Image: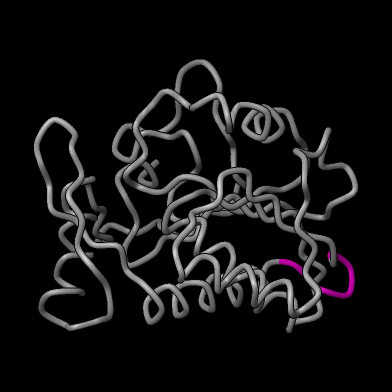
Amino acid sequence: KRNAHKGSRMKYLNQEEAINVDLELFNDYKFSGKSILLKSQFIIKITILVDQLMELAGLSCAHAIAKEFDSEKSKKALIICGPGNNGGDGLVLSKHLSLMKFVPRIYYPKRTDKPLYNNLVNQCKMMGIEFLTACPENADNYNFIVDALFGFSFKPPVRDSFADIMELMYATKTPICSIDIPSSWDVEKGPSAEKSINPHMLISLTAPKLCARD
């Protein structure tokens, strides 16, 4: 398992800190975005970052993946996108991986019907990137998987609409590259004691979260 977060001076974020970083980028640094209310134990104002930050995040992820995998030897990628910002990052990085001579195929089981996400889907289709209509039975035909399903706001349990793709990632021996948080991990406590993804590579956005510490 590759871990790029070793070092005594590394700052790790808990869930509240990760949310507050997004808020600061929106409110203070004036990146484009809009605010919503998320009800959990408390009512927390969070930001859905749009075009500007999502494009930068997806581009950065694509470059990190390209450094790890050789497009001449590891062309085929399964990109698993969720309904939130993590899924948007997956759509963006798919575009850039395609430009880097990889062959991404996207599985997007629960689409977000908002202009940003619809535009990203259209951009991918215009570039000839295939969207899978059903969950693959296995990932044997792919050189690596990009896990862009759940982000740091994930709360268990995994919903039924994602159960099949999670089972695939639990069982596969194909290398997994997780974006920000390995899907289904607790953002602070890490993997579940029962089933969990064991990613080959974890790309932290802004700063690593507490689950990446070990």
Viewer-side residue, 13 vs 22: 22
Front position in the image: 193 or 42: 42
- Quadrant housing the C terminus: top left
Which image quadrant is residue 120 in?
Answer: bottom right
Q: What residue is shown at x 85% (from left), y 67% (from top)?
A: 75
Q: Is residue 156 left or right of residue 120?
A: left
140 in relation to 76, above or below? above
Q: Residue at x 75, y 79 (%)?
A: 127
Q: Is residue 183 above or below residue 177?
A: above
Q: Is residue 57 left or right of residue 122?
A: left
On the image, the x and y values in percent for residue 31 come to 25, 81
The total of numbered circles placed on residues is 0
The quadrant in which residue 43 appears is top left
Q: Is residue 123 left or right of residue 77?
A: left
Q: Is residue 137 left or right of residue 181?
A: right
Which residue ends up furthest to the top in the rendered image?
194
Q: Position of residue 27 (x, y in %)?
A: 12, 75
- The answer to whether 134 is drawn above or below residue 170 in the figure is below
Is residue 188 placed above or below 132 in the rendered structure?
Answer: above
* Colour scheme in use: one colour
Residue 71 is inside the magenta segment: yes
**Residue at horizontal 60%, vertical 77%?**
63
Image: magenta residue range? 69-74
**Position of residue 176 measured from the top left corner of the image (x, y, whole percent):** 66, 48
Residue sitting nearer the eye, 168 or 190? 168
Residue shown at the point (37%, 76%) measured from the top left: 53
Magenta: main secondary structure equals loop
